Image (spheres, rainbow, N blue to C red):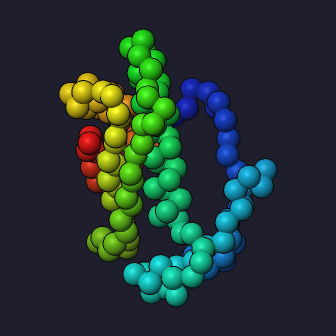
Amino acid sequence: MNTLQSVAYSAHATATGGREGTAKSSDSRLDVKLSTPKGLGGDDGPGTNPEQLFAAGYAACFIGALKFVAGQSKKSLPTDTKIDSQVDIGAIEGGFGIAVKLAVTIPSMSKEEAEQLVEKAHQVCPYSNATRGNIAVELTVN
């Protein structure tokens, strides 16, 4: 287990009602209604769900890691870099698990250079470090 050497930022949020409730950050910047997808036995209501939030968070965080490692190499990441993320949920022995797919597109960069950058980012990204060895994470470069 990696222990934080120092805390740079702390996020605080409160969820009520589980998958049929709400989630709100302490500063109210995040305030969402939650609904359970049909695939999980829900009514597929208008709210988001934990898997969508995780997919968005991981993708955004990974772009931050890409910017960081690009900067270490004295390069800048194109502003139109994007990640299409997918979070799957399903049964595992003893409960439920998730798997992640990140499809990274870095325009105006060779595939080889982008793949190297993605590998380096995967080593420093907090989400990657939190999930490494616990869930399947598939990285592709378009």
Q: Which residue is outermost to the right? A: 27
Whether residue 126 is visible to the viewer of this picture, yes or no, is no
> Is 17 on the left-hand or right-hand side of 73?
right
> Is 16 on the left-hand or right-hand side of 2?
right
36 up-or-down from 113: above or below: below
- Residue 48 in the image: x percent, y percent? 57, 69
73 up-or-down from 90: above or below: above
Q: Which quadrant does the C terminus fall into?
A: top left
Residue at point 30%, 27% (across, down)? 109
Whether residue 110 is visible to the viewer of this picture, yes or no, is yes
- Residue 55 in the image: x percent, y percent? 46, 56
Residue at point 20%, 27% (across, down)? 112
Residue at point 34%, 55% (across, down)? 100
Query: Number of marks in the image?
Result: 0
- Residue 69 in the image: x percent, y percent? 41, 23
* Residue 39: quadrant of the picture: bottom left
> Is 38 on the left-hand or right-hand side of 45?
left
Q: Which quadrant does the N terminus fall into?
A: top left
115 up-or-down from 48: above or below: above
- Residue 41 in the image: x percent, y percent? 45, 86
Q: Which residue is outermost to the front? A: 108
Q: Which residue is outermost to the left? A: 112
Q: Nearer the viewer, residue 82 or 40?
A: 82
Q: Nearer the viewer, residue 56 or 17?
A: 56
